Image: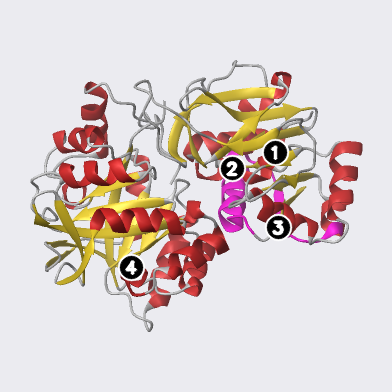
Amino acid sequence: MIRLAILDTGSGNLASVKQAVEQAAETAEIAVKVAVTTSVADIRAADRIILPGQGAFAAVKKGLDALDGMQDALEERVRAQGAPFFGICVGMQILFERGLEHGVSFGLGWFGGQIAPMDPKGPDGQPLPLPQMGWNALDFEEGYHPVLDGIEAGSHVYFVHSYAAIGHDEDFVIATTDYGGPVVAMMARANIVAAQFHVEKSGDVGLTMLGNFLRWEP
Amino acid sequence: MLALRVIPCLDVKEGRVVKGVNFLALRDAGDPVEQARLYDREGADEITFLDIAATAENRDTILEVVSRTARQVFIPLTVGGGVRSVEDVRRLLLAGADKVSINSAAIAEPELVRRAAEAFGSQAIVVAIDAKQVAPGQWAIFTHGGRRETGIDAVAWATRMAALGAGELLVTSMDRDGTRQGFDTALLEAIRAAVRLPIVASGGVGEVGHFVAGAAAGATGLLAASVFHFGQFRIADAKVALAAAGLPVRPIPLRARSA
């Protein structure tokens, strides 16, 4: 039985993430006990961790900071001990060094770079709508990362964001999407994977990713 | 390329699906959760529920529908109708809605949009704009299913809602709703020119070509109800028409999830 902790920073669509993980586990026939939690002890005891997040970078980080000892617990359980970790949407963004939404706030720094406002333009030079809201194609090299196993390059996933990664290390980018130019869609290093899009709302493609994450042995 | 979104809307009253012609004549056609599952399997890009008879007393009915849907449908779900407070938004989001649409309450109290966006993020807040043409190139906001004019200019209102933190605009032409004559593309173009938010076009779809016209007018979400609901055509037909016009769509999923 895998103990999977969904970390509640007070700003995620936690029920949706939990239900999607449970559906993915059922389809993949993996026994998972999912706990939506704010508890440091749960994070320290978790086999796998998902960090969802919605809204502003600063608000999600503040929610994390409000949980006493949580950042240390994540550093230890994820960075030192290697528990597989999945950051989703703003849960990906706060893994970078800095966010520039509503002033400058500091992230966990697991990836270099910052999260900056987007200003996408169409082929005609006209501004594209913001947020990027909807299904966009994932560009990636098939076979490169286990969390993308069984997913065809070009599959669509559901994005909602107005801020995106800049100044990051390209070596850790495993998938991009195109919205007026390439936009970071997924990052990965060692036992950490992260997605800018809403994995839990990306239909069968998202459920496949979550199933892969549950099986992933980094 | 970001795909255009084809969005079936389910009008829900007391937990059952209905669809009005010009918001008046209602016909019952089933369980909203089953309908949502079907649309998901058929390739809908989002689902919208509009609780058309929402009152303080019957809020729990829609919450239960939303919660059951969110356990079975893993694409975005927008819920509107009778949303009057930050607490209403919170309860719908907790039940499993991804976006909550605010309509009349924004007119009564525009600051509600700001407070809701601050509490839950702009991505969760849709402002629904029901507009009717009042002069050439001019539209006004109407409430109460199109019966009451507010005197508010629709384009100015869209701009104000964007400034208050709305993450998306659901623009319904009250002139076109139920007529099957197509979206009011001039209205969509006027709002597109004024705001950068994504726009969901609503009201008037009668044939697949209307989706193409809505996209050409600048909407990135294309919403319809009765044409899907009564089987005049299917989600796939709308996507085929968009793709044939050279517009990006998300392909229909190849397999259905096990029931």
Is there CB contact under 8 Å for labels 2 and 1?
yes
Mark 3 crowdedness (10 Å alpha carbons): few <14, some 14-19, many ≥20: many
Q: Which residue is mark 2?
A: A24
Task: Say which chain tag 4 marks.
Answer: B
Is there CB contact under 8 Å for labels 4 and 2?
no
Mark 4 crowdedness (10 Å alpha carbons): few <14, some 14-19, many ≥20: many
Task: Say which chain tag 3 marks.
Answer: A
Q: Inspect the magenta stretch and tell me whether residue A53 lies in it.
A: no
Q: Position of residue A18 (x, y in %)?
A: 62, 53
Q: Is residue B107 left or right of residue B147?
A: right
Q: Report how far apart the C-alphas of labels 3 and 4 lie in the structure.
A: 29 Å
Q: Which amino acid does the dot numbered 1 rest on?
A: Leu
Disc 2 element: helix
Q: What colour scheme does the image use? A: secondary structure
At x 29%, y 25%, the residue is B247
Q: Report how far apart the C-alphas of labels 2 and 1 lie in the structure.
A: 9 Å
Q: Say which label, 2 or 1, has the lower sequence index.
A: 2
Is there CB contact under 8 Å for labels 2 and 3?
no
Disc number placed over residue B81 in the picture, else none: 4
Q: Say which label, 2 or 3, has the lower sequence index.
A: 3
Q: Nearer the viewer, residue B51 or A2?
A: B51
Q: Which amino acid does the dot numbered 3 rest on?
A: Thr
Q: Which is more foreground, mark 2 or mark 3? A: 3
Looking at the image, residue B19 lies above or below residue A175 = below
Magenta residues (range): A11-40
Q: Inspect the magenta stretch and tell me whether residue A29 lies in it.
A: yes
Q: Which amino acid does the dot numbered 4 rest on?
A: Gly
Q: Which residue is mark 3?
A: A9
At x 37%, y 58%, the residue is B160
